[in-house]
Image (cartoon, rainbow, N blue to C red):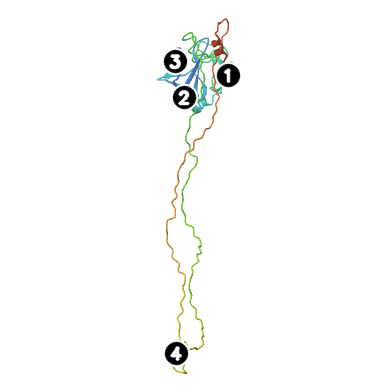
């Protein structure tokens, strides 16, 4: 059971579920207008704590800034989304919340703080009339709060790059100039210039002359030489991405005979 004196310790504390798992930070405490008993707490859930879920405080206990409730994490996260305008819950919103947590709901009030027929610390027929705990129970000032969006980044794996080497075989053709000798028959008339060579030897005889022919043939040899180096490098690119989220702001107005300056009028109208 959470008492009025413990409300200040509850706000900003950590909500713990029935298994001892931490849910998130407690943002606000809604109290019953008639009994003044703490009835609901909101816990910040979702990415960056952007959302708030309502949790009953009827059976909650406080120890070392941790508020333990008899509900599972999933049940708390799946609670109906409620926009508590002006810090109040209407009867329909409150009934949906009680149904979600398996608590009986009645519009009649009881001394316990819960709707009639239940036990614990919270709720009356005006249990939807939660209010700012910095208000009438503490001093004569009202605190105006608003939600603000905090955005961050997380690093996730998007893919892998791999450097791989394999061997391919291909046919290459290279032109090589080669020289080949051939035998050619050449005749020349006998003249005064070659007369001595022509008359050298017997007048009539049998002879043989032999010429050796040669040719060049292509020879192929292979060698392995390095041609280039290849490696993988990572580059980082920075880009701006826009994210959006819905936030709530509390507004404060006045009723009755209140003297307002121009600045006060602008502030309450904004």
Q: Nearer the viewer, residue 87 or 269?
A: 269
First in sequence: mark 4 vs mark 1: 1
Disc 1 target residue: 93
CA separation in Å, label 2 and label 3: 17 Å
Q: Helix or strand or loop: what does disc 4 sit on? A: helix
Q: Which residue is mark 4?
A: 196
Whether 211 is drawn above or below 64: the answer is below
Label 1 crowd bin: few (<14), some (14–19), many (20+), radius 10 Å: some
* Quarter containing the C terminus: top right
Q: Quarter of the image containing the N terminus?
A: top left
Mark 2–mark 4 CB contact (< 8 Å): no
Q: Secondary structure at mark 3?
A: helix
Q: CA distance from mark 1 to mark 2?
A: 22 Å
Residue drawn at point x = 58 percent, y = 16 percent: 91
Residue 24 got which mark? Answer: 2
> With respect to residue 208, does 232 lie above or below?
above
**Residue 57 place in picture, x, y as percent:** 49, 18
Residue 95, by quadrant, is top right
User: Could you tell me residue 266's position as x and y percent?
Assistant: 56, 13
Counting residues from the N terminus, which is met first, the one under dot 3 or under dot 4? 3
Q: Nearer the viewer, residue 225 or 170?
A: 225
Earlier along the polypeptide chain: callout 1 or callout 2? Answer: 2
| Residue situated furthest top in the rendering | 257
């Amino acid at each position: 059971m959470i008492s009025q004196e413990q409300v200040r310790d509850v706000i900003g504390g950590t909500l713990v579920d029935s298994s001892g798992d931490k849910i998130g930070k407690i943002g606000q405490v809604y109290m019953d207008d008639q009994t003044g008993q703490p009835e609901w707490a909101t816990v910040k859930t979702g990415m960056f704590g952007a959302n708030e879920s309502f949790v009953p405080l009827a059976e909650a206990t406080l120890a070392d800034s941790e508020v333990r409730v008899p509900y599972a994490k999933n049940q708390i996260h799946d609670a109906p989304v409620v926009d508590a305008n002006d810090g109040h819950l209407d009867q329909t919103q409150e009934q949906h919340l009680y149904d979600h947590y398996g608590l009986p709901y009645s519009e009649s009030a009881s001394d316990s703080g819960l709707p009639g027929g239940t036990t614990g610390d919270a709720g009356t027929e005006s249990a939807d009339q939660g209010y700012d705990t910095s208000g009438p129970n503490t001093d004569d000032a009202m605190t105006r709060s608003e939600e603000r969006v905090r955005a961050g980044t997380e690093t996730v794996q998007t893919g892998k790059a791999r450097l791989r080497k394999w061997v391919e075989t291909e046919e290459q053709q290279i032109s090589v100039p080669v020289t080949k000798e051939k035998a050619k028959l050449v005749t020349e008339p006998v003249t005064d210039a070659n007369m001595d060579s022509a008359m050298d030897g017997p007048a009539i005889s049998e002879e043989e002359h032999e010429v050796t022919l040669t040719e060049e043939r292509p020879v192929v040899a292979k060698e392995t030489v390095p041609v280039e180096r290849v490696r993988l490098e990572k580059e980082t690119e920075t880009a701006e991405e826009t994210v959006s989220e819905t936030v709530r702001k509390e507004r404060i107005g006045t009723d009755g005979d209140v003297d307002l300056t121009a600045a006060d009028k602008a502030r309450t109208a904004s």
